[in-house]
Amino acid sequence: LKFDCVSNDGIDQHMVWLIGLKNIFGRQLPNMPKEYIVRLVMDRSHKSVMVIRRNQVVGGITYRPYVSQKFGEIAFCAITADEQVKGYGTRLMNHLKQYARDADGLTHFLTYADNNAVGYFIKQGFTKEIHLEKDRWQGYIKDYDGGILMECKIDPKLPYID
Ligand code: ACO
């Protein structure tokens, strides 16, 4: 089992994984238009942290780092159906936090969480109260009324992964 952060950089293996992840999002996020999922997963300003087992994608999180603003927007997050509630979602989020802090220099995440995923995000340290100053994120993330805006502060020192 491994966790990797990849983007659309033309490397064959990365493309295969991104397509696998796009297919998981398509199935697990039925309210999201498929073209929108493909566009963001393949967009070069987005990155995807993935869980890979036996060279197969089990799930992942696609996010856009706004490095100048020091926050990231989580666009999609899902684990494939038969592997949910086994702890992969938690491990994935911990890898994302560690990577976004150490490689991108981010301090916060924002996401529009689906109603049924709010419980998962709360367990990952997200809150419905937004503490991040509005001028750091306004105009960067678009309003989306199919979800609840949630925030997570990334601890500056905590080791999130072993
Ligand atoms: N609601 C409430 N609690 C949840 C949910 C949920 N939907 N899913 C998991 N949890 C809880 C688990 O019970 C567990 O609690 P525990 O630590 O007390 O045992 C904890 O959250 C972590 O569970 P994991 O096993 O790590 O979570 P999992 O691997 O299943 O991943 C995920 C969670 C990503 C939400 C997965 O269930 C999934 O893909 N669901 C369908 C797609 C989805 O809803 N994605 C999020 C949409 S919002 C967005 O993409 C921005």
Image: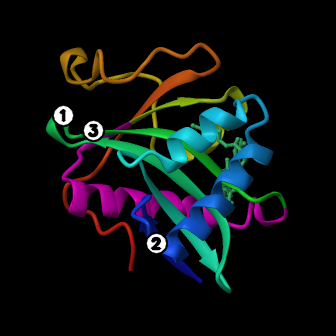
For the residues labelled 2 and 3, the Cα–Cα distance comes to 20 Å
Question: Which quadrant of the figure contains the C terminus?
Answer: bottom left
Q: Residue 155, relative to residue 32: is it above or below? A: below
Question: Could one spot residue 110 in this view of the protein?
Answer: yes
Q: Could you tell me if the residues under marks 1 and 3 are in contact, i.e. CB atoms within 8 Å?
A: yes
Q: Residue at x 74, y 44 (%)?
A: 26
Image height of 133 relative to 154, above or below: above
Per the image, label 3 sits on a secondary structure element best described as: strand
Residue 88 colored magenta? yes
Instruction: Give the residue displayed 38% in from the left and 23% down from the top.
Output: 141
Q: Which mark is residue 4?
A: 2
Real-space Cα separation, disc 1 to disc 3, in angstroms: 6 Å
Position in image of residue 160 (x %, y %): 37, 66
Q: Position of residue 156 (x, y in %)?
A: 19, 55
Residue 64 x, y percent position in the rendering: 38, 42
Task: Tell me how far mark 2 sits from mark 1, CA to CA.
Answer: 24 Å
The magenta-colored residue range is 82-109
Magenta segment's dominant SS is helix
Q: Estimate how packed mark 2 is, as few (under 14), some (14 to 19) or many (20 or more) residues with alpha carbons within 10 Å.
A: some
* SS category of the residue bearing label 1: helix
Residue type marked 2: Asp
- For the N terminus, the quadrant is bottom right
Q: Is residue 118 visible?
A: no
Residue 31 occupies quadrant: top right
Front residue of 127/35: it is: 35
Q: What sort of colour scheme is used for the picture?
A: rainbow
Residue 17 sits in which quadrant?
Answer: bottom right
| Mark 3 neighbour class, 10 Å CA radius: few under 14, some 14 to 19, many 20 or more | many
The residue pinned by badge 1 equals: 69
